[in-house]
Amino acid sequence: MCGIVGILAKDAAAPQLVDGLKRLEYRGYDSAGVATLEGGRIVRRRAEGKLRNLEARLKGEPLAGHAGIGHTRWATHGAPTEANAHPHASGPVAVVHNGIIENFRELRAELEAEGAVFESQTDTEVVAHLAAHALKGGASPREAVAATLKRLRGAFALAFLFEGEENLLIGARRGSPLAIGHGEGEVFLGSDAVALAPFTDAVTYLEDGDWAVLTRSSIEILDEAGDKAERETVRASVASVIVDKGSYRHFMAKEIAEQPEVVGHTLARYIDMAAGRIRLPHGSDFDFSKLDRLAISACGTAYYAGLVARYWFEKFARLPVDIDIASEFRYREPPLVPGSLAILISQSGETADTLATLRHCKAQGMKIGAVVNVPTSTIAREADVVFPTVAGVEVGVASTKAFTCQLATLAALAIKAGRDRKVLSETDEAKLVSSLIELPRLMVEALHLESEIERLAPVFAKADDVLYLGRGTSFPIALEGALKLKEISYIHAEGYAAGELKHGPIALVDENVPVVVLAPFDPLFEKTASNMQEVAARGGKIVLLTDEEGAAHAGETLATIVLPKAFAFVSPLLYAVPIQLLAYHTAVFMGTDVDQPRNLAKSVTVE
Ligand code: F6R
């Protein structure tokens, strides 16, 4: 993970580095640092914790140099201390790094045997020492980087700064993303276009294996073999996006509230509203009729969107779905059919496990579809067909609006598949589409339940364990509810298929355990209601999320939250709203860092 920036500026680089890093904090926020050339010498400022600590440090001890590199860290090797914060330096070289150097132990042992003294526990520091070693042997900075890259195994993006070289930055990309920003007499490096947004929207994305030698007036891109490479410069529309919290206390609150709008935008890309039919976006058309199976893979919340989609593709298109957590997919060694479709789901489009799965499936001859929110991301660029979500920039680490937009996209794809495979009639399609069109209005109604849900926060804040139960498509939403709660409130929570409760987890239930039951009044309601009685009989505190009919049929609960009646197909999108609000208000009540919870990062670019 981690975010990196590099700048050859016209004036002081440090404030610009910090500006770029602010936009990369979603990649990690354990510690941060910058290095600039002060009178030709490398000077670093680093600080533990959030970027604001580095900013405070720079206020007291400003840097004036015009060339610099910066880093915001999500710790992989070594605790999040100042000593482990980037940039790492050895003699005349400083380096920032995103990713993992897999062979760092061997390299470190080798360098230490030659007399190198290490200051940190990071894998990154070997990179600085390797480059410094090559320089000592008479190599130029460019030769030193070439020699260093040859020694590294793993996935990484790097930016190098050299003492005495006021007009030189070298960047390299293998596995992790890196982009060059083109300015007027200035040049920039960044983990993505968002980091470069304050400076330029003219961006060149490096391809895997590329490295680049930058000066204020020249850019030379080389491929892995060291041959010159031409890479396109594009206008990154993301550069114009200014993201702020508006009147909300947290990004998460704003992003939850935005859902009716962004789900509406996403649906508008997939639905011909006038005809009430599915119409995939231009360039994203796909014919599902020839498929025998569909593979879906993703991580975390995006995986839960895939779990819901499995119910839809199997029910509406009679298309068997294999679904895997992306970090496990390859290890299962599933037999993959060349020409069949794999759908990867990702908000960031940079999740390392999801990207590795994409490449694995591609190498086996599969066609790759990506449900992705960041259109410039690596996953979007490497997919054969992109199915865009239109959630806008999601800043809160806990995914909310990206999740419901993923569901909206997958719902449309499942209907398209049903039509292509002649399982759904035109009338079926019209019915399902009209339930999707109604959804943003129903989500607005669900948001009106906020104060009722907020009142439950003190109960949840006291709990050590919380269970979430659901059946059918409510089961993945139960899993998502538990994930939301644990990641931002740090309360242990588990989601279960309601029928599974009696096979073990019911042993956990007593009067201290809140049990959230997601049960719209559908054909599965009665069975879930029986499971609820099993919980009630053991003193569990039930919070029931249902609709009016469900509420009328439910027994006694601690609280019953009544959602608007919806067609069963769209319930997962609707019921996502109250479980997000419940997690949010519990975390706010507890005073945790809602938008940047401990140990997490928005974009997980390590496997
Ligand atoms: C949880 C959350 C994560 C992400 C997961 C995948 O709220 O945000 O579980 O869903 O890390 O990230 P993307 O969608 O960027 O691939």
Image (tube, grey):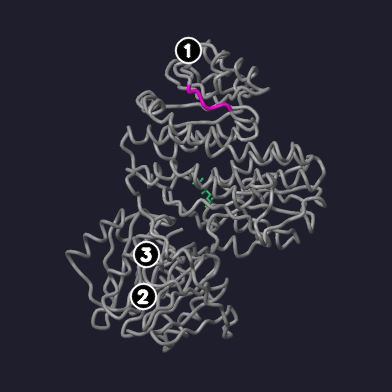
Report the amino acid beneath label 3: His
| 463 to 253, vertically: above or below | above
Q: Is residue 263 left or right of residue 97?
A: right
Ranked by sequence position, the earlier of labels 1 and 3 is: 3
Report the amino acid beneath label 2: Ile
Q: Would you say residue 75 is visible in this rendering?
A: no
| Marker disc for residue 539 | 1
Prevalent SS, magenta region: loop
Q: Position of residue 409 (x, y in %)?
A: 62, 48
> Pointer 2: what residue?
7
The residue positioned 68% from the left and 38% from the top of the image is 432
| 512 to 260, vertically: above or below | above
Q: Position of residue 510 (x, y in %)?
A: 47, 16
Q: Is residue 570 left or right of residue 245?
A: right
Tag in front: 2 or 1: 2
Front residue of 210 and 274 = 274
Q: Is residue 325 left or right of residue 484?
A: right
Ranked by sequence position, the earlier of labels 3 and 2 is: 2
Secondary element at image label 2: strand
